[in-house]
Image (spheres, grey):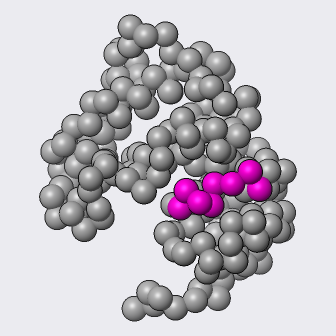
Amino acid sequence: ARAGHRNPHFLDAAWATDVVVGLWAEGLRDRCGPLLFQVPQQHPADLGGPEAFAARLHGFFSALPPPPPTGRYVLEVRDPSLQTPALAEALRDTRVLPALILHPRMPDLRVQWHRAQIDAASPVVLRWMMQRGLDQETAQARFSPFSSLQAPDLQVRDTVARLCRAMAEAGRSTWVVVSNNAEGCAPCSINALAQAIVGGASPRKTRVPSP
């Protein structure tokens, strides 16, 4: 019902702290993982343009309280034009992790890795969202009730598994968030991915993507 209306709490650090961050930190404490802030698809001009958007994000994250020791703030954008050097610098300066996204709107993971300028020692957060050629409505209709792997994406699963193994070899943590729209059933995808990470080593040497 509110689609198309301006969100009065967008990038409001005080509101986010009271309604989300405070509860997250107090409720989970030393069990906190990444807290992901998603910026939905919208015209960059509505955000003031990529440079102004990066500056606004810097101010937003700077005003949030420090996360718990085990927690990290993460940002996900769904528009490649927002993945600018200014955004990478703003996130690096505020110690916020950029999310890598497997989604039809987004470029190849290596392109995203390069644009995000991911630090050589930082954890990695990956969102496995949807296969190319699909949109939200089509995937929902095709995969409902999300009870089985209806469209196994072996190539993407292998890519994610090799990335996780490479991060582990480098002593870095990886968080993978999986959608039902990835293959038809998120729990089944997670189980298959875990098996691929542990027992399905690729004959190619795993390595961290080149920055």
Closer-to-camera residue (127/29) = 127
Q: Position of residue 46 (x, y in %)?
A: 61, 80
Dominant secondary-structure state across the stretch colored magenta: helix
* Residue 80 on the magenta span: yes
Splitting the image into 4 quarters, where does residue 145 fall? bottom left
Q: Residue at x 75, y 66 (%)?
A: 51
Q: Which quadrant, please, contains the N terminus?
A: bottom left
Q: Position of residue 154 (x, y in %)?
A: 27, 30
Q: Residue at x 60, y 38 (%)?
A: 113
Residue 41 vertical position relative to residue 125 in the rendered view, above or below: below
Residue 18 vertical position relative to residue 126 in the rendered view, above or below: below
Q: Which quadrant, please, contains the C terminus?
A: top right
Span highlighted in magenta in the image: 79-86
Q: Residue at x 18, y 55 (%)?
A: 143
Please state if 102 lies on the left or on the right of 54 as rendered: left
Asked whether the viewer can see residue 203, the reply is: yes
* Residue 35 on the magenta span: no
Please state if 170 lies on the left or on the right of 140 as rendered: right
Q: Position of residue 22 (x, y in %)?
A: 71, 67
Residue 195 vertical position relative to residue 110 in the rendered view, above or below: above
Please state if 82 lies on the left or on the right of 148 as rendered: right
Q: Position of residue 12 (x, y in %)?
A: 73, 78
Closer-to-camera residue (85/23) = 85
Q: Residue at x 50, y 27 (%)?
A: 163
Asked whether the viewer can see residue 180, the reply is: no
Splitting the image into 4 quarters, where does residue 139 fall? bottom left
